């Protein structure tokens, strides 16, 4: 933290502008050494200056340099940003000259790590920075920006404050039993308080499912026996000819993937190999992969042929999707109907025709209905979606189970206080009130270098 770091903060390639970010105690001093223009050490903070980067007597690039003095910067250190021309050679040369003058190359995520260590942001906000960078949809952006604004952090802090209030009262009762005018915590008080915390944590977990849908999308498997039109359906949904379509059964032998948006939510669609008994070694591998995709899918689109009676293979697939969110998609509705679906227990049935694009809109509407996607139009987007954070919340719920058992068995408040402190500390680790270096190294290693 006492050294000065630098990295390219924009994508390296041919572009109009490339930005090199420098942060640390000597950032302004060192950049000033290689800058031909105003004296950067004497200019006001948060100002931009025109000039050139020079090495010895050679002009390397024409630049704009932004000077930002601590503590009002991203890292809360002195920060300089050099706006170069976007050529690879010019950018790398400027970076090389900075290294020659004693600046160290930044590690992945080190700027954000310094922002955290210097107290500008907490861990939830730090992880939201990366979520914002990686967001692919408008709804992902909204979730990330909510976390970056501190909405989730404030929720965790509120829960911690609720816990520390009762912990403090228990400790006063234990340490100063002779005082009669202090509030005495009872088992009933603890039971009420711990139920409030439990309900809040369970609400976070429930809403996290919606957040996960926004962040990761809906994994959608198109399954069916060979030659029912799975690849044609994929192409219709993607509005492109991504999958090879023939009238030869078994054409698709490996999974083919694509993504579309429905109500701003990603639908990660996987076209699978036709599922049937086969002696072909290659096709067997494809069938095995298809069954694995089926097991892991959030949504299954099971294709059947309108002009054929249900086969044994169809019945087996219908049985496999009984306990999953599934839509029965009956293809070839332009042909004579021979299929009989009266005995099916699944009411989610859509008739389509992939040749004429008939029924595709109805299928999308059914998906929106099945996952209640309309609710996201009025959502506040205050979701916790990070796996690390959710694992800590689940850990807290497990500790609460132990407390509830302890209350039932009427063990002493001093023993239950230990569990309360464990919950308080675990919630603290979510926002970074307590952490270890190994966690930070792992977390920030996933960031891009310039952030």
Image (tube, grey):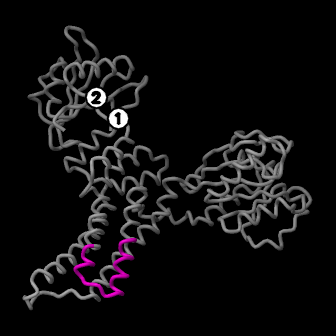
Would you name the residue on which mark 2 appears?
105
Residue for point 27% across, 78% down: 416
Which is the main secondary structure of the residues drawn in magenta?
helix
Query: Considering the image in quadrants, where does the C terminus appear?
Result: top left
Q: Is residue 324 above or below residue 107?
A: below
Vertical position of residue 183 compared to residue 361: above or below: below
Q: Pointer 1: what residue?
A: 449
Q: Quadrant of the N terminus?
A: top left
Q: Is 357 located above or below residue 426 in the figure?
A: above
Is residue 412 on the magenta stretch?
A: yes
Q: Is residue 68 left or right of residue 343?
A: left
| First in residue order: circle 2 vs circle 1 | 2
Q: Which residues are magenta?
A: 398-418
Circle 2: element type: strand
Could you say which is closer to the camera, residue 419 or residue 359?
A: 419
> Quarter-wise, where is residue 59 in the image?
top left
Please identify the residue farthest to the top as the structure is shown: 57
- Which quadrant of the structure image shows residue 168? bottom left
Label 1 secondary element:
loop
Q: Are marks 2 and 1 in contact (CB under 8 Å)?
A: yes
- Residue 195 in the image: state x and y as whole percent: 35, 80
């Amino acid at each position: 933290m006492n050294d000065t770091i630098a990295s390219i903060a924009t994508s390296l390639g041919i572009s109009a502008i490339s930005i090199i970010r420098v942060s640390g105690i000597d950032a302004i001093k060192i950049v000033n050494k290689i800058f031909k223009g105003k004296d950067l050490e004497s200019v006001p903070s948060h100002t931009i200056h025109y000039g050139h980067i020079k090495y010895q007597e050679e002009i390397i690039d024409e630049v704009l340099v932004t000077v930002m003095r601590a503590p009002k910067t991203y890292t809360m250190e002195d920060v300089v940003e050099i706006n170069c021309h976007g050529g690879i050679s010019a950018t790398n040369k400027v970076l090389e000259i900075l290294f020659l003058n004693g600046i160290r190359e930044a590690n992945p995520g080190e700027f954000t790590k310094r922002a955290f260590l210097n107290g500008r942001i907490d861990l939830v906000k730090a992880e939201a920075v990366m979520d914002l960078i990686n967001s692919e949809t408008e709804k992902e952006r909204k979730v990330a920006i909510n976390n970056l604004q501190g909405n989730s952090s404030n929720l965790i802090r509120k829960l911690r404050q609720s816990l520390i209030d009762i912990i403090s009262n228990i400790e006063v009762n234990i340490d100063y039993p002779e005082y009669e005018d202090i509030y005495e915590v009872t088992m009933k008080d603890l039971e009420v308080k711990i139920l409030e915390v439990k309900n809040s944590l369970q609400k976070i977990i429930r809403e996290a499912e919606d957040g996960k849908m926004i962040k990761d999308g809906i994994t959608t498997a198109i399954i069916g026996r060979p030659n029912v039109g799975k690849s044609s359906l994929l192409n219709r949904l993607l509005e492109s000819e991504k999958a090879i379509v023939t009238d030869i059964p078994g054409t698709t032998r490996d999974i083919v993937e694509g993504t579309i948006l429905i109500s701003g939510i990603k639908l990660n669609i996987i076209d699978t190999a036709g599922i049937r008994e086969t002696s072909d070694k290659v096709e067997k591998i494809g069938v095995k992969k298809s069954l694995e995709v089926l097991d892991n899918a959030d949504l299954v689109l099971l294709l059947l042929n309108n002009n054929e009676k249900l086969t044994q293979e169809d019945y087996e697939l219908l049985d496999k999707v009984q306990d999953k969110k599934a839509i029965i998609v009956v293809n070839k509705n332009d042909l004579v109907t021979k299929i009989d679906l009266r005995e099916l227990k699944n009411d989610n049935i859509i008739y389509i025709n992939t040749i004429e694009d008939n029924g595709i809109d109805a299928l999308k509407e059914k998906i929106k209905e099945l996952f209640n996607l309309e609710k996201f139009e009025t959502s506040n987007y205050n979701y916790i979606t990070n796996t690390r954070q959710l694992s800590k919340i689940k850990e807290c719920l497990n500790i609460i189970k132990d407390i509830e058992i302890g209350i039932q068995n009427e063990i002493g408040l001093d023993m239950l206080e230990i569990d309360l402190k464990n919950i308080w500390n675990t919630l603290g680790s979510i926002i970074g009130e307590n952490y270890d270096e190994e966690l930070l190294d792992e977390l920030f290693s996933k960031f891009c270098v310039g952030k």
